[in-house]
Image (cartoon, rainbow, N blue to C red):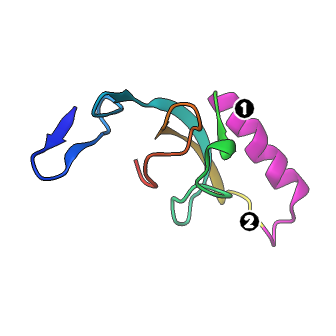
Amino acid sequence: MIISKECGPQFDPTDGTVGDIKLVKRWVIFKNSDGLMWPARQGRYTFATEDEATKEKELVEKVNSADMIPRGELGVAAKWCWPEHFDPVSGNQ
């Protein structure tokens, strides 16, 4: 847990805490070119397992042309998310 004297509880990526709040790891699809979550940084676009995220990524690549989403542009990664609504804590963790 990281506590700043000026700002209070801070996000600690080593143990997934913000003060007394325990974050959860969720899987997301991201763009390799900029590392940002795709399609948006919202909990509804996170997945409980790597397998679920990978299947969704493959489906997106299958139903979209290579002009729209170049092959190899999307990847999956685990991110720290807030409990309940699963919004990611930050863009790059």
Q: Nearer the viewer, residue 44 or 27?
A: 44
Image quadrant of residue 51? top right
Of the pair 8 and 58, the residue shown nearer to us = 8
Residue positioned 64% across, 28% down in the render: 48
Q: Quadrant of residue 84?
A: top right
Decide if residue 10 is on the left or right side of residue 76.
left
Q: Residue furthest right?
A: 63
Relative to 2, 30 lies left or right: right
Q: Is residue 79 magenta?
A: no
Check disc 2 and give the amino acid type: Pro
Distance in Å between CA atoms under marks 2 and 1: 21 Å
Tally the marks: 2
Which label number is shown at residue 70?
A: 2
- Hey, which residue is sitting farthest left in the picture? 5
Q: Residues within 10 Å of mark 1 (few under 14, many from 20)?
A: some
SS under mark 1:
helix
Magenta stretch: give its range.
49-68
Question: What residue is rendered at 9% in x and 46% in y?
Answer: 5
Q: Residues within 10 Å of mark 2 (few under 14, many from 20)?
A: few
Measuring from the top left, give residue 7's x and y in whole percent. 19, 51
Badge 1 is on which residue? Answer: 52
Residue 81 position, x and y percent, is: 49, 38
Q: Main secondary structure of the magenta part?
A: helix
